[in-house]
Image (cartoon, rainbow, N blue to C red):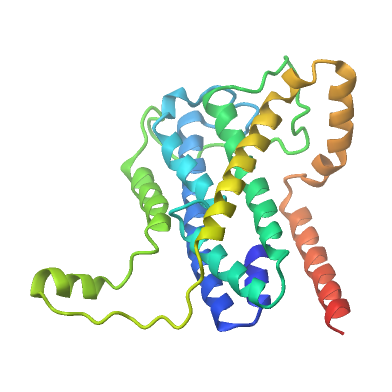
Amino acid sequence: MGLMTIGFGLLSPLALGGTALYLLGHGTAKSALFIGAGIILHRLRTVDELKLHARGKKIFGLASLLILAALGLAGAPPYGTLLGEAVIDHNAEQLGFKWVSWIFIAASVITAAAVFRVLGNLYFGLESRQSGDKSAGDTGLTDEPPETKGSHNRTPALMWVPLVRSAAHGAAIRFQDQSGYEAIVLDHAAVPSPQIREEAPLAPALWRGGISTAGALLLAAFSLARRRLFRRQRWENAFATAMHPLRRLHSGLIGDYVVWLTFGVAAFGVLCFWLIR
């Protein structure tokens, strides 16, 4: 939402068009992840990361689609988020806001790393845990029961089809003008090329997508392997102490999230008023 707010805040037709592209790509990636979470809940009967440790072998085919959705969150090609980021960043640079690129990178790294971390823990069990250890998120445990009935040994087509469609649709946003394509193939008609008023360069966006993807993978790997990296107990305790306030904020309660969203919107409004007065 924050990245799309930046696109709206630029108040230009080019940035608004980029925001629309980003919204489509981001929305399809998120919808694929939500459907994937539903499949995990159906097959493994939980969506708690602590309880999903190394249990993904039963749904290994799901990994490729979830990875594709995570790449969409990172702004990697060929997802529509890449095109949206390219347009918004290009327009922001024209207006003198070159720092917007770093905001996109930071947000993409953190968002995609969260998905990569869950996938690494689910399919490979990369994070070593001791019995009874809940330090990775003791305030956010969830025990949501499955909502589907019948056998949990297979995934219904009604779950697979929307997931594949969402994951593929986000990568196919760049393809457009279906009627023109049909006229060329079927009727051999000459379809005039649309006149593009302004074009955003893709090279910076490709670099940014690569950096975001690499950063997300590194951050996820560090999160999964930190116990092996910090073998000394004092380093582990220091890391846990530093992360404790952040974990306390993630209570898993919808009311708390509404309060924080309201606070964030109000703080953002005050900041905007202070900057533009």
- Work out whether residue 18 or residue 90 is closer to the camera in this orientation and state it: 90
Q: Quadrant of residue 189?
A: bottom left
Counting labels gives 0
- Work out whether residue 108 or residue 132 is closer to the camera in this orientation and state it: 108
Residue 115 placement, left or right of 276:
left
The residue at 82%/43% (across/down) is 246
The residue at 80%/60% (across/down) is 259
Residue 126 placement, left or right of 192:
right
Report x, y in % for residue 105. 66, 53
- Residue 33 visible? The answer is no
The residue at 74%/25% (across/down) is 226
Quadrant containing the N terminus is bottom right
Residue 107 placement, left or right of 245:
left
Report x, y in % for residue 22. 53, 65
Report x, y in % for residue 161. 33, 48
Report x, y in % for residue 73. 56, 51
Quadrant containing the C terminus is bottom right
Q: Quadrant of residue 256?
A: bottom right
Image position of 165 with respect to 89: above or below: above
- Residue 32 visible? The answer is yes
Image position of 257 with respect to 235: above or below: below
The residue at 80%/20% (across/down) is 230
